[in-house]
Amino acid sequence: MTGTLLGTIGVLGAALITAVFTYLGVRRSARAQASQAATERELGLIDRWKTFADEAEERADRIEQKVNQKIAAQDEAIADLRRRLSCLEAREKVLRDYAHQLRMHIERELGPPAPPWPDDVNKPPH
């Protein structure tokens, strides 16, 4: 009976050891799978962030191009306004000079006709 008991204990011990090692193996495999899943989630997040960053950079480039186009258009408009202002200032000088001529004509009590209208006034603005 001792031999049978020892044999049974040996078999039970071997089964227990096998069960423990199987449990540890399954647990380790579950941890590895969980770790791998976490790693894949993190890599997925990294890939999504990289995609987001690339899209944001492309949007920023498009916005920069639009801003540069608007700046160029405004620069052209400012240059045109400055040119027109220069023309108006020149025309104002001509008209002011003509006003002085008319005042001198009246002050000298010269009758009609008035001094001729300046040619520059009749020209269309540049």
Image (cartoon, rainbow, N blue to C red):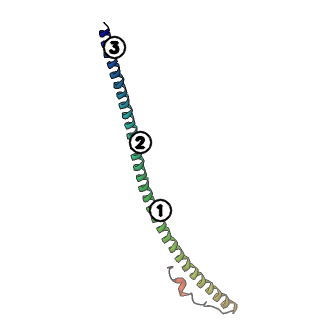
Q: Name the residue located 41 percent from the left edge and 56 percent from the top edge.
A: 58
Q: Name the residue located 37 percent from the left edge and 34 percent from the top edge.
A: 32
Q: Nearer the viewer, residue 35 or 48?
A: 35
Q: Name the residue located 53 percent from the left edge and 73 percent from the top edge.
A: 81
* Circle 2: residue type: Glu
User: Is residue 115 shown left or right of residue 73?
Assistant: right
| Label 1 secondary element | helix
Identify the residue position indicated by label 1 in the image. 67
Identify the residue position indicated by label 3 in the image. 9
Q: Nearer the viewer, residue 77 or 109?
A: 77
- Residue 88 placed where, x, y %? 56, 78
Estimate how packed mark 1 is, as few (under 14), some (14 to 19) or many (20 or more) residues with alpha carbons within 10 Å. Answer: few
User: Is residue 63 shown left or right of residue 7?
Assistant: right
Q: Name the residue located 38 percent from the left edge and 28 percent from the top edge.
A: 27
- Residue 66 placed where, x, y %? 44, 61
* Circle 3: residue type: Ile
Q: Nearer the viewer, residue 60 or 52?
A: 52
Relative to 50, residue 89 above or below: below
* Circle 1: residue type: Val
- Residue placed farthest to the front in the image? 2
Q: Report the Cα–Cα distance between label 2 and label 3.
A: 48 Å
- Residue 126 placed where, x, y %? 49, 79
| Label 3 secondary element | helix
| Label 2 secondary element | helix
Q: Are marks 2 and 3 in contact (CB under 8 Å)?
A: no
Q: Report the Cα–Cα distance between label 2 and label 1.
A: 37 Å
Identify the residue position indicated by label 2 in the image. 42
Dividing the picture into quarters, in which one does residue 116 lie? bottom right
* Label 2 vs 1, first from the N-terminus: 2
